[in-house]
Amino acid sequence: MVNKIERSVLEKIAVIGGGSWASALVKILSENKSQVHWWMRNENDVQHLTNYRHNPRYLSGVTYDLNYVKPSTDLRTAVEVADWVILAVPAAFIQEALSGLEKDALNGKVLISAIKGMIPKQNILITDYLGQQYGVPNSHQLVVAGPCHAEEVAMEKQSYLTIGSYDLATAERFCELLRNRYVKANPLEDLDGVEYCAVIKNIIALACGIARGLNYGDNFQAVLVSNAMQEIERFLHAAMPIHRDLNGSAYLGDLLVTAYSQFSRNRTFGNMIGHGYTVKSAQIEMNMVAEGYYAVQSIYELNKKLKVNMPITTAVYLILYERIAPAVEFEILKEKLT
């Protein structure tokens, strides 16, 4: 399949989204001399970027070379001219973001999901949505996994990315576009497992944040994370039963950085809930989307069919959606952990 995509002097990549992760990916790709057609919804942000070479709202310290970065609010044109299309908007908004595209607009392109969430209510992965809605086959889809925070990319700290795929040759080509002196990227033949793990680790980060907000200590968090890895393993075995080493960076590594890092928005969101914020007030104060909030409902609903033992996911769901007091629910949860 990869041979069907002709390599040009400048790789043409569309990046859909204006948040921190989109900003980090544009930095990496443009500095590696790819031509990035960067779609943002907000006209003022596009104008600011065009005039001052900074994203005014996210990673504002990063300067972009406009010889390689083409900001725009024209989604159709950005996608049309690109061979690679990176989706980096919250999962809850992906349908709206792509609504202006025709059904065949993504034909022949490689789609890369940098989204760590699922389609709400439908409870399906982004890659499944792209297949159902736009006819994009799995062989033309990739998933970006960490462990990697956008803020550390902006600071050019050593970072690692894993590209999940069913086609390792295509994944390796995309890895080549990402690698630089501070980013290492490796392909992995596990599209669905990497994507599911990226979704569930945000739920676990919420739980870790809630625990911190309730004044549980490091000892408890270590037990929480180790039990979470077992929970992820049980879920993946039920949902997509193939052999995979969950000690790898795309699984355990991504879970650890999201559960422990100061940059984790899901951990921050959970911490606010643990401190007594309502969901709405936490969302307003953060002014950023915590993917785990939407993901926990999807995984909880999906698990009604799979019937996997997922006490941490269940606890987070009950706190966020059934309004069970965090302190009460964690008293129950701590008795289920080993």
Image: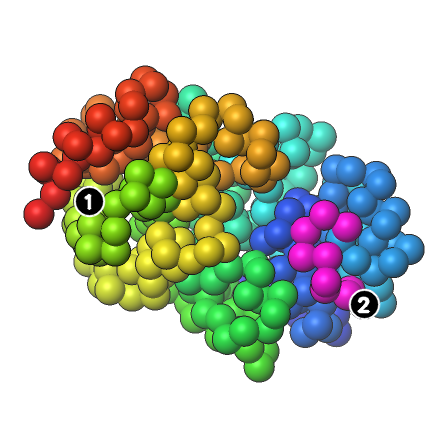
Q: Is residue 45 above or below residue 311?
A: below
How far apart are the alpha carbons under marks 2 and 1? 44 Å
Three-letter amino acid code at disc 1? Glu
Checking the image for residue 322, the label placed there is none
Secondary structure mostly taken by the magenta-highlighted segment of the chain: loop
Asked if labels 1 and 2 touch by Cβ distance under 8 angstroms, the answer is no
Three-letter amino acid code at disc 2? Asp
- Residue at the farthest front position: 215
Mark 1 element type: helix
Mark 2 element type: loop
Image coordinates of residue 50 in percent, x first then y, are: 87, 54
Residue at 91% from the left image edge and 55% from the top image edge: 51
Checking the image for residue 231, the label placed there is 1
Q: Is residue 63 above or below residue 317?
A: below
Examine the image and state in which quarter residue 167 appears. bottom left
- Residue at the farthest top position: 322
Q: How is the image coloured?
A: rainbow
**For mark 2, what is the residue?**
65
Residue at 83% from the left image edge and 39% from the top image edge: 43
Span shown in magenta: 56-65
Residue at 9% from the left image edge and 37% from the top image edge: 335
Disc 2 residue crowd, few under 14, some 14–19, many 20+, Cα 10 Å: some
Residue at 79% from the left image edge and 58% from the top image edge: 54
- Give the total number of marks visible in the rendering: 2
Nearer-the-camera pick, 150 or 123: 150
Answer whether residue 268 is visible to the viewer in this image: yes
Lateral position of residue 80 relative to residue 252, left or right: right
Image coordinates of residue 116 in percent, x first then y, are: 46, 45
